[in-house]
Every structure is written in C-alpha cells, then in structure tokens.
C-alpha cells in the first residue's frame, strides 16, 4: 500500500491571428470577361482542449451561407491549415522558423544545441547502440533491474529533462540500448521532480547459522515517477507546485517509460488552484487519482481499510475448507 502527495497546471495557449490578403483585382475590361471566382475564407481553427470532444453537426436551417467548393480546393485548404499548426506547435519550440512564433513563451525553457546529442526517437526498442555516452550529460536513474539515462541539459538545478534521447543499461554496465517507449514523449525541455517507488527487502538470519550477519535490509526501487513542474517553475519559485496531471513512469522490470493515466476528481478543470491537489497512487504504482487535500484520510484509516480487505480474504479462504458453499455470510 503506497500513497504519494503531488500538484499541476497547463501552459497558457496563445491565440493565433489570421491575416487575409485582398484578392487580385483585374482591370475593368478584363474583369467583364473572367468568370466570377469562388472565394473561400478559411475559418480560424482553435486548438483542441484535451479531454473535450467537439463535433460539427452542420447547419440544418438550409440557409444560403454554404460555400460552393470542390473537394480539391477543400483538401488544399485543409493542408494549408495543417502546415500552420505544425509551424506553431514545433518550430517555435525548436527555435527554428521566423516570425513571432520563433520567440519562446514565458514558460518554455530555451533549447541548447549539443554536439553529442543523438535523437533516439523512432528507433526500434531494445536495440543496442554501437557507441558509448558521456554519463555526466545524462540523468542516471538507478532501478533494481536496470539503469535509465535521460539527457540532462545544462541547468543550475539539474531538474531539466530532454526525453528525445534516452538509454537503458543493466545495473552498473556500459552496454547501452534503446528503452521501450509506451507513450508519446515531450518534444521540448521540461522540469521534473523524481520520486522513487519501491520496497525494502529484509533478510533474516538463518536459524542454523548464528554467526551469520543478523538482518540485511536492501532497498529495491521498482519504479520512478518524474512529475512535471507546473509552468516549468523552479523549486525556489514562490509559486512552485507540481503538475500531477503529467507524470512519466519508468518501470524497472519492463525497462520502459510511459505517461501515467491520471484521474482528476476535483472540479474547476485546468484553471483550478493546484495547491489544493492531492495525488493518490495505488495498485503497485499503476493507479493515479487527484483529489482535494481536504478529503485526505488519516494514515491509520487507510491502513485499517486495507487490512480489513486482506483479513476478509484470508478468512474466506480458511472457511472455504470447512463448508460446502463458496461465499460466507458471517459478516
């Protein structure tokens, strides 16, 4: 039984402006001979908000505002809009392209070029690379079954992660391979806080060997949670909170990394006050839920609830040997 505390919020969306240029006007004499063109004004597209499904059912009123376009023109307009989305989403983050989109936002971390950077995205998983890396340029995350490496951009706090280059090795070895990536990873720098999830393995001395060491305790880190900082703020910031809706889970046994599926039960949506968030992690680090901190249970209550379920199951297994029917009514 495990429980963790954490906090969250998304960056602000910058609206795009669409500039329409006046169409070409031919001379009056030529205009009388030309057929009337069909003009299509593309509707400004808004960025889709996560967890919200939007649909356009059309206008059933039969008005005269429908555009008369063929499929080729419609597909061409769609392709232009998609290209604009690509420019806004990626060029600004990678520091390429022109215009106002090349300037990073207030919550973005400046991208730094590195001569040793090798993007491992798109590589086949568990592929062993034929080169060695400088481990000082990476975050080394030591787990029970493996060591995980994620590129570490220069930063005084050493809390910036670049998920575009990652490796995994057996414990304390230099045979680097590509890890399993089970969810899309961020394409830009983000700040994260690392939390270990594991257990302590206590070995008792054998009865027939009294001279052996008494008790041996080993800590086994089975998973590591990387929780994003809200708006990429530093820990020293007065408004620092954790973004519990964006957690990346590194699994020791499967040597993989994925993004956690978090259930949010607090009203207010993405604009809520993140300081009141409480993260509950259960089921061996596979279940994540955000509740209000006012609903936090006392640790004793949580333990009693878990012990009650376990005791009930143990008692059912015991009574099953003494009766013919499978379910007991003794409760």
Image (cartoon, grey):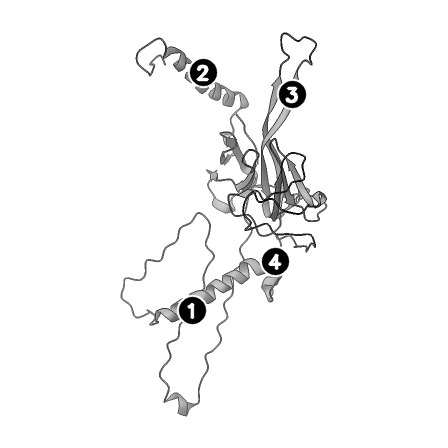
> Residue tagged by mark 2?
311
In front: label 4 or label 3: 3
> Residue tagged by mark 3?
217
Which mark identifies residue 94? 4
Q: Is residue 156 left or right of residue 119?
A: right
| The quadrant where residue 218 appears | top right
Q: CA distance from mark 3 to mark 2?
A: 27 Å
How crowded pointer 1 is (Cα within 10 Å; few <14, some 14-19, many 20+) is rated as few
Q: Quadrant of the C terminus?
A: top left
Q: Is residue 256 above or below residue 284?
A: below
Residue reaching furthest to the bottom: 29
Q: CA distance from mark 4 to mark 1?
A: 26 Å
Query: What residue is rendered at 55% in x and 53% in y?
Result: 12
Image marks 4 and 1: residues in contact by CB distance under 8 Å = no
Query: What residue is rendered at 59% in x and 60% in y?
Result: 92
Query: Of helix, strand and loop, which mostly describes the magenta segment?
Result: loop
Mark 4 or 3, nearer chain start: 4
Q: x, y percentage for residue 312?
A: 42, 16
Give the SS element for disc 4. helix
Q: CA distance from mark 1 to mark 2?
A: 65 Å
Per the rendered image, the range of residues in magenta is: 37-41
Mark 4 or 1, nearer chain start: 1
Q: Nearer the viewer, residue 39 or 197?
A: 197
Mark 2 or 4, nearer chain start: 4
Q: CA distance from mark 4 to mark 3?
A: 46 Å
Q: x, y percentage for residue 171?
A: 65, 34
Give the SS element for disc 1. helix
Q: Is residue 274 above or below residue 54?
A: above
Q: Is residue 78 above or below residue 269?
A: below
Q: CA distance from mark 2 to mark 4?
A: 55 Å
Give the SS element for disc 2. helix
Image marks 1 and 2: residues in contact by CB distance under 8 Å = no
């Amino acid at each position: 039984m495990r429980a963790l505390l954490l906090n969250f919020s998304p960056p602000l969306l910058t609206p795009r402006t669409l500039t329409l240029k006046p169409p070409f006007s031919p001379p009056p004499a030529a205009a009388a001979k030309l057929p009337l063109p069909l003009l299509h004004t593309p509707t400004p597209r808004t960025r889709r908000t996560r967890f919200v499904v939007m649909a356009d059912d059309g206008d059933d009123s039969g008005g005269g505002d429908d555009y008369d376009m063929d499929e080729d023109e419609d597909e061409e307009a769609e392709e232009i809009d998609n290209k604009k989305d690509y420019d806004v989403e990626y060029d600004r983050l990678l520091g390429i392209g022109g215009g106002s989109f090349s300037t990073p936002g207030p919550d973005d971390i400046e991208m730094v070029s590195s001569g040793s950077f090798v993007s491992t995205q798109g590589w086949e998983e568990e592929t062993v690379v034929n080169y060695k890396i400088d481990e000082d340029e990476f975050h080394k995350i030591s787990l029970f079954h493996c060591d995980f490496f994620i590129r570490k951009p220069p930063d005084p706090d050493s809390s910036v992660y670049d998920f575009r280059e990652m490796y995994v090795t057996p414990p304390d070895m230099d045979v680097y391979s590509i890890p399993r990536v089970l969810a899309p990873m961020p394409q830009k720098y983000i700040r994260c806080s690392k939390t270990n999830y594991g257990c302590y393995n206590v070995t008792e001395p054998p009865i027939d060997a009294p001279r052996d060491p008494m008790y041996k305790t080993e800590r086994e880190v089975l998973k590591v949670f990387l929780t994003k900082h809200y708006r990429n703020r530093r820990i020293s910031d007065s408004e620092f909170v954790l973004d519990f809706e964006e957690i990346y889970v590194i699994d020791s046994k499967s040597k993989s990394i994925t993004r956690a599926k978090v259930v949010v039960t607090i009203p207010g949506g993405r604009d809520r006050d993140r300081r009141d968030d409480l993260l509950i992690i259960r089921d061996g680090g596979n279940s994540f839920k955000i509740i209000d901190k006012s609903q936090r249970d006392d640790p004793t209550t949580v333990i009693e609830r878990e012990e009650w379920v376990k005791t009930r199951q143990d008692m059912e297994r015991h009574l099953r040997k003494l009766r013919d029917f499978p379910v007991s009514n003794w409760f």
